Structure formats: structure tokens, C-alpha cells
Image: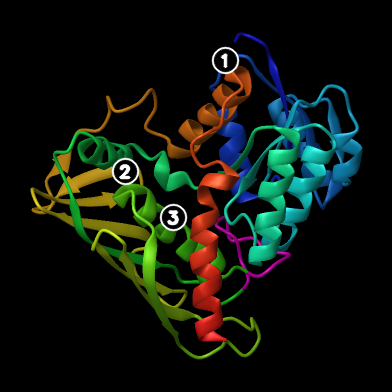
Amino acid sequence: MSKTVRIALAGPGAFGIKHLDGLKLIEGVEITSIIGRELPKAQEVAARYGARHVTTELDEALARPDVDAVILCTPTQMHAQQAIAAMRAGKHVQVEIPLCDRLEEGRAVVEMQKKTGLVAMCGHTRRFNPSHQYVHRRIAAGEFHIQQMDVQTYFFRRSNMNALGQPRSWTDHLLWHHAAHTVDLFQYQTGSRVVKANAVQGPIHPTLGIAMDMSIQLKAENGAICTLSLSFNNDGPLGTFFRYIGDSATYIARYDDLFNGKDEKIDVSKVDVSMNGIELQDREFIAAIREGREPNASVAGVLPCYEVLHQLEQQLG
């Protein structure tokens, strides 16, 4: 239980840094390797977080005996193949959202996890944000039942830049990345599979090659519904905002913060050991490794989300 878990992190960009900041707060975790596309940048991050090894090649890090687990914050298109490579090398793996952008690749990751028995988890952070945990506990206690979720995912991203305003080496996607958060959370919070899903999208961007606006409707087997609006064109408050409309209350979740339907803040500071959803996600990963158990947001646990995304892609295609 107290064993040091030695981590390699691939992709020290905007989100990789969030993981490194969370990991340094977890006792018994050591960052031993940083893998980055640009060596000087990876070296700078490694020096900041005390990693002894730096490389541009994931396979080099996977071959090291001082790496127990890997966190992948790499471009979407690499996630599934790299997760499989990590498990094939005997390493536990946490892959950032999305698990895949092709359903068959996600299924291949789940099969490799079953074959190896290693911990394999996907970064569905909304399961861990204190705001959503608070709602989940009320649901689990039978005190709240979701009738509808209304979700807005809005960014202003008309060029290929990351959260730090730096150029990206890959193109983000409203369906396979940003909608994945909500589709998974809707099924997780309702405890019910999506049985009906519809989507429409706006024009395809001439240079990015992706839809910049999208609207999704979902219905769960238990009757709950969800409406999701997504845009890369929104010039205003950025991020994802969740409204839970239930039989006994209304909640509005803005990342780790929670408000009631009258926009009065709810104290969620005692829900977990931290108010940082990324840190809590990483704590679950480390705990699952130490305890030899399936984590919340395991690759098998989130696969139903990607089955829905695949269905929606077929509609949009």
C-alpha cells in the first residue's frame, strides 16, 4: 500500500503540466521520465519536476525498470495505440480523454487490459470533480434523481492552439473529445445506458477540417434526457457548464464549483481531500495500482461512452 509508484508522463503540454502539479501532491509518487515531442521543452519540464530521464521516444521510457506506470497526455490519435503499448510493456496506464477516436481502437485497449490485468484508466475528470461527486452522492443516497441535464461546452478556438495559447501538433474535436465528457457523465450519473442519441453539426472549418458547432440530444434507458451544445466559436465565458435538473433540486456545476438553481454557491470543500479534479483523478489511479483493483473511469467502464460517440459519428457522417 505504501509502495512508491514511479510515473512516466508523455506529453508535457498544458494538460500534462496539470497532471504533474497534481502528482506532486500525492505521497509516494515519483516522476521518473518525461516524454515529449520537443526535447528542450521536455528537458525543462523534467528539471522542474525532478524527473531523471527525458526522451522523445515513448518506447524508450516503457523499457525502463524505474517506470511502473504511464500517463498519456499525447494527441488524441495516439491514445489507443500508446495505451496498448504501455500495457504490453507491463506498465499501468492512464490515458487522457478521449480513449480513442475510433471505436474499434477503444475496444482493443479494453481487450489488452483484460489480457494483462493491469490498471488502465481514462481521464474522464468530471467523475472526480467535487461538484459532480456531490451530485453523485445524493443520487447514490436516493435523495436526487436526474430528470434532465443541460450542458454547454464553449471555447473560442478558431486556430489550432492549446489552453496556454501555444500551437498544437494535432487538431481537437468537439465530438470525440469534448462531448465524451458529457456523454460519459450522463451515463455515470444516471446509472443508465443511453438508448437514443441524435446529433447535428454546423459547417466544417475550411482549414481545421472539423465542425466548429454541434448539438447533441441523449435519452437514457431510465427516461432521463440530456441536451449538449458545443462550440469552438463562442466569444465569451469558456469551459463546460452543467445544469442538473432533478426531482428535488437543481444544481449548476462549473468545474470543481457547485451552485444551486438560484446560483447560490454550495460548499463542496469537504467532499474529497482536494478541490482539484485532476489531482483527485490521479489519486484514484495511484490508489488502484496500490490496491490492485479496477479504478473509477477504467477503460472498460468508459467504453459505453465511446459506443455512443461512434453512433453519433455515423449519423453525422
Q: Magenta segment range?
A: 160-171
Measuring from the top left, give residue 212's x and y in whole percent: 50, 80
Q: Amino acid at mark 3?
A: Asp
C-alpha separation, residue under disc 1 versus residue under disc 3? 29 Å
Helix, strand or loop at mark 3: helix
Q: Magenta span: helix, strand or loop, mainly?
A: loop
Is residue 74 visible to us here?
no
**Which of the labelled discs sits on residue 208, or is there none?**
none
Q: Amino acid at mark 1?
A: Glu
Residue occupied by mark 1: 27
Q: Is residue 166 magenta?
A: yes
* Mark closest to the chain's N terminus, 1 or 3: 1
1 or 2: mark nearer the eye: 2
Q: Residue 150 appears in which quarter of the rendering?
A: bottom left
Judging depth in this view, the residue of 32 and 119 nearest the camera is 119
**Which of the labelled discs sits on residue 132, or is there none?**
2
Measuring from the top left, give residue 151's x and y in whole percent: 31, 64
Residue at 59% over, 75% down: 159
Residue occupied by mark 3: 184
Residue 169, compared with residue 207, is above or below; it is above
Helix, strand or loop at mark 1: loop
